[in-house]
Image (tube, rainbow, N blue to C red):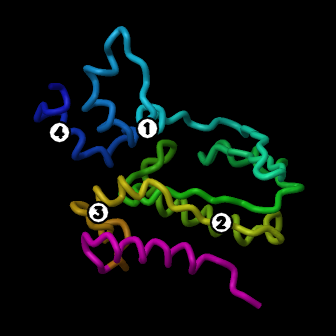
């Protein structure tokens, strides 16, 4: 099995050093199944697949008679200039942040930690005049990958003020507080 090869496991253990998608483990452990000529994706396959958002994608939907329009915007630096034109009639910003990226670097800048970039972007958004009248919902995702990673990878190397070791609850609390302290102060 390809996934069990020691060289593959060693490379996977160093995935924070290069750009390897979060679903690599899932798909590499299923490479025989997904490479079959009669392969049909399962629900889990679809949920683990990732398509990078480029530009701004709009979706309309209705829940219990209320109509909504959702904009999915690319989070990469080169995509951000496209955002502002879409927020004239927005009531809520849902900011999605990956919990598992605390030891990874940006694809476009390998000197910048992904979680630090996310925290800085969050702070810019919540303090921006464009978003000042909007509610902001913070959604911390990839907690399953975070739970797996935190058992072996202490955030202290990238966040020296963190002192909780490889403890899920302490690290989760730490990162939640990092976002909360960037929120505007109540007047």
Residue on which disc 4 sits: 9
Q: Residue furthest right?
A: 89
Q: Quick one: SS at disc 4?
A: helix
Q: Is 78 left, or right, of 12 in this rendering?
A: right
Q: Quick one: SS at disc 1?
A: helix
| Local crowd size for mark 4, using a 10 Å CA cut-off: few (<14), some (14–19), many (≥20) | some
Residue on which disc 1 sits: 48
Name the residue located 76 percent from the left edge and 39 percent from the top edge: 58
Cα distance between the residues tagged 3 and 4: 18 Å
Q: Position of residue 25 (x, y in %)?
A: 29, 38
**Of the pair 61 and 78, the residue shown nearer to us:** 61
| Local crowd size for mark 3, using a 10 Å CA cut-off: few (<14), some (14–19), many (≥20) | many
CB-based contact (under 8 Å), mark 4 and mark 2: no
Q: Position of residue 64 (x, y in %)?
A: 78, 52
Cα distance between the residues tagged 4 and 2: 37 Å
Name the residue located 33 percent from the left edge and 31 percent from the top edge: 27
Name the residue located 88 percent from the left edge and 56 percent from the top edge: 89
Q: Residue furthest top?
A: 37
Give the magenta-colored segment's residue range. 163-187
Cα distance between the residues tagged 1 and 3: 20 Å
Q: Position of residue 3 (x, y in %)?
A: 19, 31
In the rendered structure, which disc, 1 or 4, sits on the residue that comes first in sequence? 4
User: On the image, which quarter does residue 149 sit in?
Assistant: bottom left
- Residue 60 drawn above or below residue 114: above
Residue on which disc 3 sits: 150
In the rendered structure, which disc, 2 or 3, sits on the residue that comes first in sequence? 2
Q: Residue furthest front?
A: 64
Residue on which disc 2 sits: 137
Is 31 within the magenta?
A: no
């Amino acid at each position: 099995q390809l996934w069990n090869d020691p060289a593959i496991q060693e490379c996977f253990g160093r995935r924070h050093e290069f750009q390897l998608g979060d679903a690599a483990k899932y798909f590499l452990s299923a490479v025989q199944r997904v490479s079959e000529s009669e392969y049909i994706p399962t629900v889990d396959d679809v949920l683990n697949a990732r398509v990078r958002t480029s530009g701004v994608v709009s979706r309309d939907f209705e829940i219990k008679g209320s109509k909504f329009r959702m904009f999915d915007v690319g989070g990469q630096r080169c995509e951000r200039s496209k955002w502002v034109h879409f927020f004239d009639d927005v009531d809520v910003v849902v900011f999605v942040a990956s919990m598992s990226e605390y030891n990874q670097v940006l694809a476009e800048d390998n000197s910048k930690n992904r979680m630090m970039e996310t925290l800085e972007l969050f702070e810019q958004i919540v303090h921006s005049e464009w978003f000042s009248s909007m509610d902001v919902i913070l959604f911390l995702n990839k907690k399953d990958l975070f739970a797996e990673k935190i058992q072996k990878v202490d955030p202290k190397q990238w966040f020296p003020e963190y002192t909780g070791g490889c403890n899920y609850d302490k690290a989760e609390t730490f990162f939640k507080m990092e976002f909360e302290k960037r929120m505007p102060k109540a007047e």
